[in-house]
Amino acid sequence: MTRNGVGIRTAQVRSQRLTGQIHVYDGVGKGKSQAALGVVLRSIGLGINTPSNSNRVLLLRFLKGPERDYDEDGAIAALQRGFPHLIDQVRTGRAEFFGHDEITAFDRDEAARGWDVAKGAIASGLYSVVVFDEINPVLDLGLLDVDEVVQTLKAKPQELEIIATGRAAPQKLLDIADLHSEMKPQHHPTAKALLIDGIEIYTGAGKGKSTSALGKALKAIGRGINHPGSTRVLIMQWLKGGSGYTEDAAIAALQQSYPEVVDHQRCGRDAIVWRNSRQELDYLEAERGWEIAKCAIASGLYKTIILDELNPTVDLELLPVEPIVQALLRKPRDTEVIITGRCQNQPAYFDLASVHSEVYCHKHYANQGVELKRGVDF
């Protein structure tokens, strides 16, 4: 059977891999750290529904010292309070940008401290996922020895998942990566000319689109927790009906503690939809999701709205483009809308994006026949 259009992998029961992979997210576009946060959310969600402690996550953040607050801190702290056995966070460095000619002894000491934590975490066997957020620029600045880092990662426990983020990943790290997604910024003169702000799009063939959106949601939830009344979040997901998505449990836990901060909706069948396998229910579910999203955008009640997999929904012609364009043009100025998913033809609303990251796939383990993994890929 010929499959035309864009199909989205669902969370149907399937075989999954046990071997951990090395992920690298780099590039000058937005979404790298957010993608890592999205995987953290999925892994915690898996752990909530798993009786053992086998899904513990370490979020090790270089160049993000504790003297600065980040939006996601509130949500991470809330998850730590609720599930202290599932997530650890360590922050090192100073929380400001600096170049090669501004490196201090403190920067070297903090990088070394972070790497000591990293080596211990890898050796401990305590974690299923270890995120090295912003390690790429640390290596580029020469604050850590690239060869030592590469050798340590190559010798990691077989089941451990490693995620490295940040600009300027060194080639030696890319060489050992099982997955390499590069975020490339795309610019839209129309958005700038019309002074449109607050519309972000993540698309492309690389991994990191939905997880970037989940990371963005985690940041917004954290902002709402830290500053009550400042934000309310809607996560709307198309083509992802059914159950089995591991992020659901973590989002539900945050909803239970902070019902005034986050809402989450799914629509679609629990099946992959191709252009030549569309059913009437696919149209009905897509339209149902859009009615919810359209109301949320117009209401001004939500400051952050995630429209996950809207792009392939439009690409499959399950929704028309023009109503989406009009809804985005009329959105309140202080409402952020984040749209994700790959598509073969860019719809007209792409021209309204103030942030557009094209996620390029340089490497993906799935292309080598490696199975996807629950808690990481879905």
Image (cartoon, grey):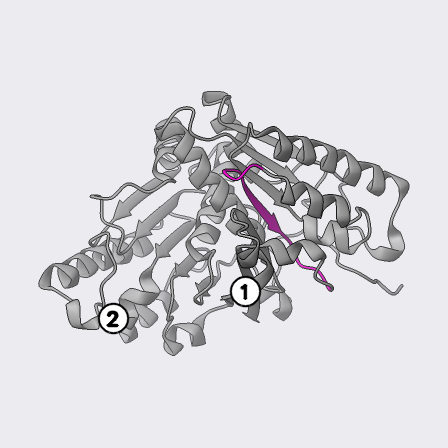
Observer-side mark, 2 or 1, equals 1
| Image spot of residue 286 (x, y percent) | 77, 40
Q: Nearer the viewer, residue 159 or 75?
A: 75
Q: Residue tagged by mark 1?
A: 187
Rendered-image quadrant of the N terminus: bottom right
Q: Which residue type carries mark 1?
A: His
> Is disc 2 in contact with disc 1, using a CB cutoff of under 8 Å?
no
Q: Is residue 155 left or right of residue 344?
A: left
The residue depicted at 27 percent of the width and 58 percent of the height is 119
The residue depicted at 38 percent of the width and 52 percent of the height is 130
Alpha-carbon distance for marks 2 and 1?
Answer: 28 Å
Q: Which residue type carries mark 2?
A: Leu
Would you say residue 241 is visible in this rendering?
yes
Q: Nearer the viewer, residue 95 or 191?
A: 191
Occupied quadrant, residue 308 = top right
Q: Residues within 10 Å of mark 2 (few under 14, many from 20)?
A: some
SS for dot 1:
loop
The first of marks 2 and 1 along the sequence is 2
SS for dot 2:
loop
Q: Residue tagged by mark 2?
A: 141
Occupied quadrant, residue 62 = bottom left
The magenta stretch is 332-344
Q: Which mark is residue 259?
A: none
